[in-house]
Image (cartoon, rainbow, N blue to C red):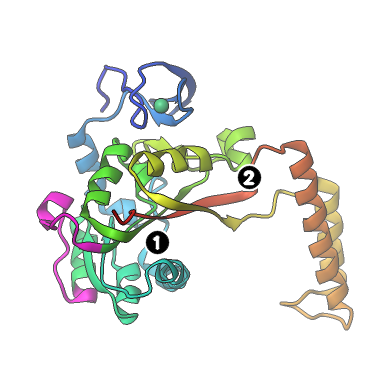
Amino acid sequence: MAHDRHADCPLCRSSKQTFYRKADSYRIVRCDQCQFLFVSPLPSKEALATFYQQPAYYEGSDLGYDDYLGDRHRHEQLARGRLHRIENMHPSRGDILDVGCAAGFFLSVAQSRGWQTLGVELSSSMADYATRLLGHRIAPTLTDAGIQSGSLDAVTLWEYIEHIPDPQDEIARLVALLRPGGVLALSTPNTNYWVAIHQPDRWREYKPPAHLGFFTPATLRHVLKASGLEQITIVRATPRAPTQPYLLQRLLLLLRDQVGNGADRRTALWWSFSLAWRLGEYISRGLYRVRWPACDLHIGLEAYAIKPKR
Ligand SMILES: [Zn+2]
């Protein structure tokens, strides 16, 4: 599935790279110049297209989403928060393009808030679903969508940038489609999450060929800045409680069984367990901060940026 030639860094084009780790039969390397982690050599374009046409990708295979359609409510909830941020930067709404729009859940929320929606999705089964949901065509690729340059008010890429072999080129292409003052927004797993760095065997985002690039707040900022975007905001999203030290975890579970918690108010003292739980979480986060001060406790990244007006 792979070319035998090593790939240059897709962000800074440097050919100097250091082996980082293996994932299945793929090699993940770190760029010596900009520190970006990526798969090298890359799978071919044809191999990637075939991979995304497998319906299993969206229905619970190890490499894809567990059950994308069943998670609709969660996707819509996320969409509202993300649109709220975009609308703060671009209050007048307008035309929004979602690249890799899957079943169209984000776009349907955008539609209900007054945006004119456009979508691109490679998987034909997902694109058909989105077409029915939104009432308009979803193009298989950006080229097929035939969008005029400088015509969009917002472009979004949710959990997409880690899937493509050429993120820098793709962002540049999308920025060209934005009007001056338009917003680009994206999300991606955070490779600076402590598990990704200190327990990489447990980090499920190292999964080529689905994921080909692995971003940190620094490399994400790099790719957006290099495309001429400004007012870049990187949001560390979805904090995850660190795995608590074993003894603390045992103690908390014992307490919960005895007194209950907010969800299961077994005794009148349920609040004491909730308090202990929060305290435990607070302390263990503090410990992780001390132990690995350079790592994040957040599993995801979101970025928002504006195309300058000039
Ligand atoms: Zn690089």
Label total for image: 2
* Residue at the extreme bottom: 268
The answer to whether 228 is drawn above or below residue 123 in the figure is above
Residue identified by numbered label 2: 296
User: Is 134 in front, or is 113?
Assistant: 113
The answer to whether 87 is drawn above or below residue 17 in the figure is below
What residue is rendered at 25% in x and 22% in y? Answer: 3
Residue 141 located left or right of residue 94: left
User: Is 160 in front, or is 217?
Assistant: 217
Amino acid marked by disc 1: Asp
Secondary structure character of the magenta stretch overall: loop
Measured Cα–Cα span from mark 2 to mark 1? 27 Å
Residue 128 percent coordinates (x, y)? 18, 66
Residue identified by numbered label 1: 67
Q: Say what secondary structure mark 1 lies in.
A: loop
What residue is rendered at 48% in x and 47% in y? Answer: 189
Q: Quadrant of ligand 1?
A: top left
| Pointer 1 local density, CA inside 10 Å: few below 14, some 14–19, many at least 20 | some
Q: Say what secondary structure mark 2 lies in.
A: loop
Quarter holding residue 255:
bottom right
Quarter holding residue 42:
top left
What residue is rendered at 28% in x and 55% in y? Answer: 100
Residue 181 percent coordinates (x, y)? 32, 61
